[in-house]
Amino acid sequence: MKIYTKTGDDGTTGLLGSRRVLKDDARIDAYGTVDELNAWLGLARAEHVDDEIDAILGAIQADLFALGAALADPNPAGPYHEAVGGSFATRLEERIDALEASLPPLTCFILPGGSTAAARLHLARTVCRRAERLVVHLSHIPNEHVPQTLVVYLNRLSDFLFVIARAVNQRLGVADTPWSGL
């Protein structure tokens, strides 16, 4: 099988099912940004902080593939449309709680950065917020069906990425940089 099909040479791409849309369609923008987020997580994983962090980020990358499939399946009765259930966000909440238990409480805002791995996770967090905005936008377009669980998951994921960036800095012995204020 060849990697190129030439079917997109006219500026369109196929969704799951037979529907073709322009490559700048809101749905494509949303799941393309989820794909970008997944790539940033892959780059953060390449730092290999430790096996636990790697396993957690790998599981989230798999979640993001499911989320991308849900976005690529515009049919509410389609096989992938409901690929992301409420348990996905619940797992993130449990991971956030576990990581926060080992972190000092936040007493100020912190600047993104610290170690290279944490900086990459902070960047992933900002891409996650963009993906969330695009999914919310898509959900407001008439006749576009977006499960609410996708918005919830992305919202929770950005929180998780903030916390895991702090945890990574802690594990690597790098202090978070407090924001000095105005």
Image (cartoon, rainbow, N blue to C red):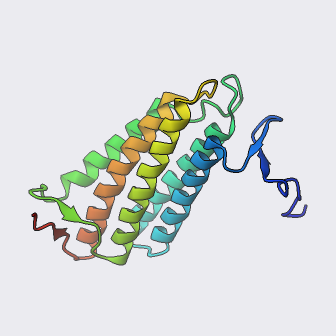
Residue at 45% across, 51% down: 130
Which is more toward the observer, 159 or 132? 132
In percent of width and height, residue 128 lies at: 44, 52
Rendered image quadrant of residue 172: bottom left
Residue at 19% across, 63% down: 110
In percent of width and height, residue 169 lies at: 27, 70
Q: On the rendered structure, is 85 left or right of 90?
A: right
Quadrant location of the C terminus in the rendered image: bottom left
In percent of width and height, residue 132 lies at: 45, 44
Q: On the rendered structure, is 73 left or right of 64?
A: right
In percent of width and height, residue 142 lies at: 60, 25
Q: With respect to residue 13, does 42 lie above or below? A: below
Q: On the rendered structure, is 28 left or right of 121?
A: right
Q: With respect to residue 156, does 5 lie above or below? A: below
What is the tally of numbered marks visible in this picture?
Answer: 0
Rendered image quadrant of residue 68: top right
Residue at 49% across, 52% down: 60
Which is more toward the observer, 26 or 66? 26
Quadrant location of the N terminus in the rendered image: bottom right
Which is more toward the observer, 106 or 55? 106
Residue at 86% across, 63% down: 4
Q: With respect to residue 117, does 105 lie above or below? A: above
Q: On the rendered structure, is 75 left or right of 174?
A: right
